[in-house]
Amino acid sequence: MRYDALVVGGSFAGLSAAMQLARARKNVCVVDAGAPRNRFAAAAHGFFGQDGVPPLKMIADARAKLLAYPNVTFVEGCVASAQADGAGGFVASLDGDRQLTAGKLMLAFGVQDGFPDGIAGVRERWGASVLHCPYCHGYEFSGRRLGVMVEAPHPPEHALLIAEWGPTTLFLNGNNTVGDEMRDKLQARGVTIEAGRIVALEGAGHDLSGVRLEDGRIVPVEALFMVPRTRPSSPIAEQLGCAFDDGPAGPVIRTDAMKMTTVPGVYAAGDAAMPMHNATLASADGVMAGTSMHRAMVFGA
């Protein structure tokens, strides 16, 4: 079967895009590997009408509503490669040699986070007490001891934002210097500056109680905010020849205002195609991409 649209990625962006296409009565296939980026978080926050709901439940509920449409197919798996099919569409090869063909292709596979080398305890606490978004998780740590670790190209002024939620320590991790003007601003907000290199995070289970520095000191901290480097979760955008831009955390698939990539017929949405990562924005990005794909099917593009 040749689908009207193939959506690679079944999280916030992909499911939102597929819903628009399904309601436009197009035959849609969604392929998902089952490992959304926010699976480590116990709850999502700030999402319209879903504040405090576990991300995996939000995804499962959205998938169930999408599959209520008879023109939607869901495939569990990973797309290993994709290419033009020579007939104006695309063919995607899944692990296990299965192939799917479609007239248009949506890339919504998200990104993977890369963590700094040489710091023990980061990965185990990611999404629980090591966090990237204060708007998503800051409120839950209100008034508690917070930390910010910044590395180039992210400026130390990020600590000024985190200080809105509680007393903050800026960890330079041995990599950054702070100019006099910025130091004055940080100190005026009560931000403590620690220049030493971090070697480990301390605390029971997923909790964080302190940051251990190279000199042996442990700085009490209950949540650590950081911006990890990211990379696309799939190589297929590069395989297809899509252009990328440099984002603040890593490469971002280049799209136009209608969410089409530099390859005609290939669209992209969500974290892999946005410089700012947020569940609400990913869903909205998917809505734009899905409606744009449908309009292209009608008007040509």
Image: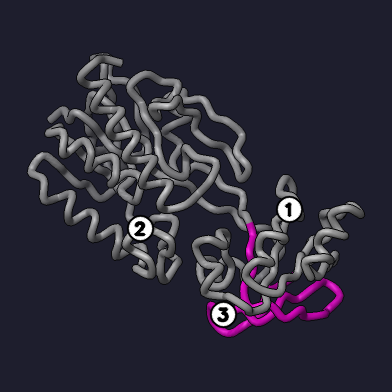
Instruction: Tell which tag, 2 or 3, sits nearer the viewer.
Output: 2
Q: Which residue is mark 2?
A: 48
Residue 143, x across and y down, in percent: 63, 78
First in residue order: circle 3 vs circle 1: 1
- Give left or right: position of 220 versus 71: right
| Above or below 283: residue 294 | above
**Residue in front for this viewpoint, 21 or 116:** 21
Instruction: Say which residue appears at 27% left-offset and 20% top-offset.
Output: 85
Say which mark, if any, is on residue 151: 1
Q: Amino acid at mark 1?
A: Glu
**Residue 131 falls in image quadrant:** bottom right
Residue plotted at (42% across, 53% down) = 279
Specify the farthest residue to the front.
188
Amino acid residing under circle 2 = Phe
Q: Which residues are magenta?
A: 199-226
Q: Which mark lies nearer to you, 2 or 1?
A: 2
Residue 14, placed above or below residue 178 = above
Of mark 2 and mark 1, the one earlier in the sequence is: 2
| 93 relative position to 252: left or right | left
Give the position of the C terminus as an image quadrant.
Answer: top left
Mark 3 — residue?
A: 207
203 magenta-colored: yes
